Amino acid sequence: MVRWLINTCLVVLLVVCPTSCRRAQPAADPNAPTSGPAIPGAGATRGTAKSAAASEIPDVDVSNLPVKLQVKIGAARQALRSAPDDTQKLLDLAALYYTQGFPQVAVPGLRRASDLEPNNFVWFYCLGRAYDEAGEAAPAIAAYEKALTVHQQYLKEHPQEVQMEYQPAHVRLATLLLDKEPERAAEHLRHVLEFAPADPTALAGLGRIALAAKRYDEAAEHFRHALAGAPRYFLAHAGLAAALQALGKTEEAARHEQQASGNQQWSPLDDPLEMVMLRKGLRLDVMLSDVSDYVQRGAFDRAERVVQLAREVDTEGKRTRYALGLLLLGRGKGAEAVRELRSLVTEFPDFTAAKSNLALALAATDQFADAERLLREILDQHPTDTLALDNFCQLAIREKKPQDALEPLNRALAAAPDDANLHMSVADLLLSLEKPTEAAAAARKAVELAPDSMALRYALGSLLYIVGDLDGAEREWTEILRTFPDHIRSRMGVVTVLMKRKDYAGVDRVLRAGLEHRPNSAELLNSLAWVLCTCPEDGNRKGEEAVRLAEKANLLSGRTNASYLDTLAAAFAEVGRFDDARKTADEAIRQAQIAGRADLVQSSGQRKAFYERNKPYRETE
């Protein structure tokens, strides 16, 4: 019942949005990629302001950048000279400077774009980012404030569009105000939470304000809620450790101090506009992340184009060659993947990830003995290497010898018996080996080792659901909701269990309770709308309300989410608006095609067939 709802529940989303590193000098490490989409509203604008020559943008010594990057910067400057009032060309050059370590040189171009299009908040926001990265707080604050003012005015003039300001602007502005004007900062952070009550960056910001004011219990609560949505957020771990230390909870504080020592560059802030700049500026880590995403989605042609671009700016070539090896492996070109990864491992013998995936490539070409030898070699040196463990389990499954994988898994747990995350990783691997009892035991041990980790408890619930323990899954997810009632994934998990039991009244109750905490959650709005218009029991359907909820979900998502459009089409059909249902179903199919969702293209098409016969759709087993 409601398969898409079940799938949504079980997918653990990890929002990782790299942010550019603040550098006064050109980038020392090769971090730069993909030509991305145009910024919304950006385009050639002529005659709206006095023409400015590209020479107004200061030249800068880029001689220590890769030659291809030097050429691209030179080409971008030349293109701007031919069309100095073209905001897209201003962006192209500014993005390269911003991403490659010269944010102060990006300022004039972005300022020029804001002069040309003063009603487009995007330019003021990007200008704020450039000032911010250049360490100029005062003009950055002014630019962010101007961006919000312009956007607020736009929303007033266009009430039919999404009534939501650009949240990263509030977060970044608050960050700059945090130390000197904490009350103003708190106002901006609370504004973010009105629309996104679980936003980790806003919650962590409020936690920092409370910590500075020595309101330690309040600070700890904010940081805990931040970690509920972003378990690897090092700033929240550090803040929680400080608050707990002040409260005398030294043992718990030590656990969070340890987790705070991880990747200092990771942030859960979802900032699409900055990502556009980073892609246009050819930031390597973003490009390679895109490659990984494309390969997982099977969009191999896109992945190949990005790899080719990445090779132009990756001076060492190590990571790009690794990405190419994974692309070749994903495309089923095992022999080519073997050659590429073997060459990489020969040059970089300590590159264990490449070595581990070389083993998979060897297995793909039926060289099972060599693959096993290579993985055992890695695990002898690094018994807790989760990628090697995962690949070893895959190999054991392919060779139909799942028992062989148990020894290295047990050895990993023996090497790190108190590592909760390792226990959960092993639980996943045991499940892949069709060892559900052992998997559940490992997952429970993970939660026992880290009882305050909502992420691990959620994962335990998911595993129990998969192995058919619905009561256990519901119990774990409900436990999370007692402390974090705004945690959508746990709520959706409970909903899925209730749908399995055909408890439609319970589904209605749980979703409405969620909307009390997250009234602007497009996911909850969409889920309730779906149940209200497709439920097989007549008494539980409320078509008009379903239409209202689905329209709001699509408004909040910018009408680009295929699943939400699919729901809106079903809601229209439920109230007899079949023309609207057919048109919206076509829109859903187009968005699903854009997103590469073949499953949704098919299911939306099947539902459209009902609407073409002037029949509403009913969810069935």
Image (cartoon, rainbow, N blue to C red):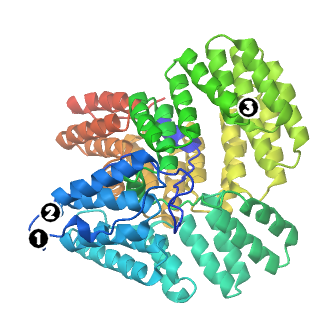
Task: Reply above or below: 470 against 103.
Answer: above
Residue type highlighted by circle 2: Thr
Q: Going from the N terminus, do you reach mark 2 or mark 3 first?
A: 2
Q: Would residue 89 be seen by someone viewing this image from the given angle?
A: yes
Quadrant position of residue 258: bottom right
Relative side of 326 to 549, left or right: right
Q: Going from the N terminus, do you reach mark 1 or mark 3 first?
A: 1
**Badge 2 is on which residue?**
45
Q: How crowded is mark 2: few (under 14 residues within 10 Å), some or many (20 or more)?
A: some
Quadrant position of residue 487: bottom right
Q: Which x, y percent locates residue 89?
A: 24, 57
Quadrant position of residue 107: bottom left
Q: Which x, y percent locates residue 113?
A: 24, 68
Task: Please tell me whether mark 3 sits on a helix, a strand or a loop.
Answer: helix
Between marks 1 and 3 in the image, the one whose residue lies nearer the viewer: 1
Task: Please tell me whether mark 2 sits on a helix, a strand or a loop.
Answer: loop
CA separation in Å, label 1 and label 2? 7 Å
Residue type highlighted by circle 3: Ala
Between marks 2 and 3 in the image, the one whose residue lies nearer the viewer: 2
Residue type highlighted by circle 1: Thr
For residue 388, the mark is 3
Q: Do the residues labelled 2 and 3 touch (CB within 8 Å)?
A: no
Q: Which of 134 and 232 is in front in this view?
A: 134
CA separation in Å, label 2 and label 3? 53 Å
Q: Residue at x 30, y 63 (%)?
A: 162
Q: How crowded is mark 1: few (under 14 residues within 10 Å), some or many (20 or more)?
A: few
Q: Which x, y percent locates residue 402?
A: 77, 19
Q: Residue at x 87, y 33 (%)?
A: 410
Q: Which residue is drawn at 25% across and 40% down?
A: 587
**Badge 1 is on which residue?**
48
Q: Which of 134 and 230 is in front in this view?
A: 134
Q: Are marks 1 and 2 in contact (CB under 8 Å)?
A: yes
